[in-house]
Amino acid sequence: MSKTVSIAFIGLGNMGGPMAANLVKAGFQVTGFDLSASHLDQAKAQGVAAASSAQDAVKAADVVITMLPAGKHVLGVWQDVLAATKAGALLIDCSTIDVESARAAHALATGHGLTALDAPVSGGVGGAQGATLTFMCGGATTDFARARPVLEAMGKKIVHCGEAGAGQAAKICNNMILGISMIAVCEGFALAEKLGLSHQALFDVASTSSGQCWSLTTYCPVPGPVPTSPANRDYQPGFATPLMLKDLALSQDAAQSAGAQTPLGAKATELYQRFLDSGASEKDFSGIIAMLRS
Ligand code: NAD
């Protein structure tokens, strides 16, 4: 896809703002819209042309990207903009939303003769700023191929997971594994403390043994063994607890509608809800170790 293509970017928050800025840096023409005037102003300072509405943003766009809080926002915006979108345009939703809404968004686009991709991301705000996100994509192979050069300007790894909704399915399954594995690692450290085993000793053994996982080796929930993990800065996010709980709740909705048994996913959701209720809205999700200790 040539960089002379015009991109509309709707939802210029913590993730969307830096993602749109990276598209500008890569040479794309980007027109943005956000309900928040301050987010729109910040994007403008990064070279994004500010539109007066979502419809205004999409009217000349070859690619429309949304990065919004939840499924209802995505469906609402897509419903609003579809009639104003150019024939032949590709819609890409990068938000993390439920699989059913993702499939409904695809159906809305195809109902208007347009094509669509669900392309949620992992990598957080740091990945959005550094253009190192992983994109998990659901949709037709031809649409994935069209989207790839645009996504490559914002990310490092672009994976085609399957048909409509498959990107969201991959994201939700991955983050359910993450929520469960973080609790497992925290419990391991909490037990080690009671047994008089040092954090470093457990880390040295488990990081090269069968307990090895990302929650331990990249995101260690105790200070010391991995100096870059949030545990070393009083659990400042990172990946904030409300976002982990959001993704776990999506996994449980998906499990219920698909008839899948996810007992540990359900328990992790319950534990993260308790952690959030205890006042952890500003804490990284690895901070749950404090609650598990007590
Ligand atoms: P955010 O709240 O910072 O940004 C969302 C933006 O959408 C806000 O600026 C808001 O004003 C705007 N918005 C809401 N409704 C709108 C509408 N109708 N029209 C135009 N703009 C509208 O959230 P975020 O952290 O950027 O997250 C966005 C998505 O990315 C979420 O689905 C989130 O789950 C996902 N995500 C976030 C992270 C992270 O670390 N923050 C990581 C991976 C995925």
Image (cartoon, rainbow, N blue to C red):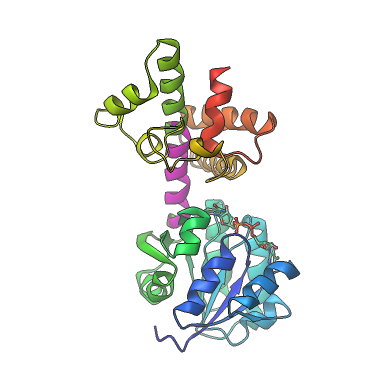
The reply to whether the magenta stretch includes residue 240 is no
Residue at 44%, 56% (x, y): give it. Answer: 167
Numbered circles on residues, count: 0
User: In the rendered image, which quarter contains the C terminus?
Assistant: top right
223 up-or-down from 189: above or below? below
In the picture, measured across the screen, residue 73 lies left or right of residue 218, that is right
Q: Position of residue 275 (x, y in %)?
A: 62, 30
Q: Position of residue 143 (x, y in %)?
A: 41, 73
Q: Where in the image, quadrant-wise, is ligand 1 located?
A: bottom right
Is residue 86 something one can see in this rendering? yes
Quadrant hosting residue 214? top left
Along the viewing direction, whichever of 5 and 215 lies nearer the viewer: 215
Quadrant hosting residue 248? top right
112 up-or-down from 187: above or below? below
The reply to whether the magenta stretch includes residue 176 is yes
Q: Position of residue 286 (x, y in %)?
A: 51, 35
Residue at 46%, 89% (x, y): give it. Answer: 4
Mainly helix, strand or loop, the magenta region?
helix
Along the viewing direction, whichever of 110 and 191 lies nearer the viewer: 191
Residue at 32%, 22% (x, y): give it. Answer: 201
Where does the magenta region start and end?
167-180
Residue at 52%, 59% (x, y): give it. Answer: 103
